[in-house]
Image (cartoon, rainbow, N blue to C red):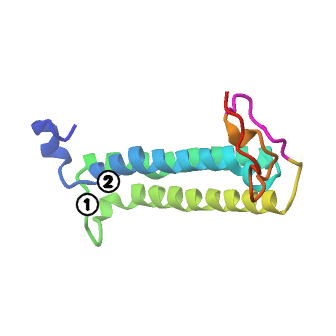
Amino acid sequence: MLAITPVDFQYHDTYFVVAHFHYVLVSGAIFSIMAAAYYWLPKWTGHMYNQRLANWHFWCSLISVNILFFPMHFLGLAGMPRRIPDYALQFADINAIVSVGAFLFGFSQLIFLVLVVKCIRGGEPAPAKPWEGAEGLEWTVPSPAPYHTFSTPPKID
């Protein structure tokens, strides 16, 4: 969208660019990493994680990341520049909301850390294949996978 000259004229070097970049790319990467961790955690630890804690983590992360990045778009459209050490007073209220979102997102990652530690320490034993649709050789061995996974090469059909 920054390739469209009239739009870029307003967006250029504003917080809108910062908001868009982080909202799309960083959030997409972080949520993908969290999804992968949830997918592999039972195989890594041999225990199933607490589903209620996982739901809390997901919803707190989702809500807080939107509180964090969505208002930044409006800051940019209102003219707040990026790369600035101190912002103008008219942006203080929305920046306060953004800061609350950032702290909540950080707090929700502490929930994830607690979940991982609890999963490592114990819990319900994970089956070799905890997820429906999990295919591949890694799901044929017990959870956690043994150090030498296959003593003989597996037969691949």
| Highlighted range, magenta | 126-135
Instruction: Give the CA separation, mark 2 to mark 1.
Output: 7 Å
User: Of the residues shown, which amino acid type is indicated by label 2?
Assistant: Val
User: Of the residues shown, which amino acid type is indicated by label 1?
Assistant: Arg
Residue 149: % across, % down: 74, 52
Count neighbours of disc 2 (C-alpha within 10 A) and say few if under 14, some if 14 to 19, many if 20 or more: some
Instruction: From the viewer's perspective, tell me whether residue 15 is left or right of residue 50.
Output: left
Which residue reaches farthest front? 152
Callout 2: SS: helix
Count neighbours of disc 1 (C-alpha within 10 A) and say few if under 14, some if 14 to 19, many if 20 or more: some
Q: For the C terminus, give its image quadrant.
A: top right
Q: Nearer the viewer, residue 6 or 138?
A: 138
Q: Is residue 15 magenta?
A: no
Instruction: From the viewer's perspective, tell me whether residue 61 is left or right of residue 65.
Output: right
Residue 116: % across, % down: 73, 58
Mark 2 highlights which residue? 18
Residue 45: % across, % down: 77, 56
Name the residue: 27% across, 50% down: 17
Q: Are marks 2 and 1 in contact (CB under 8 Å)?
A: yes
Name the residue: 51% across, 49% down: 65
Residue 82 tag number: 1
Report the predominant secondary structure element of the magenta stretch.
loop
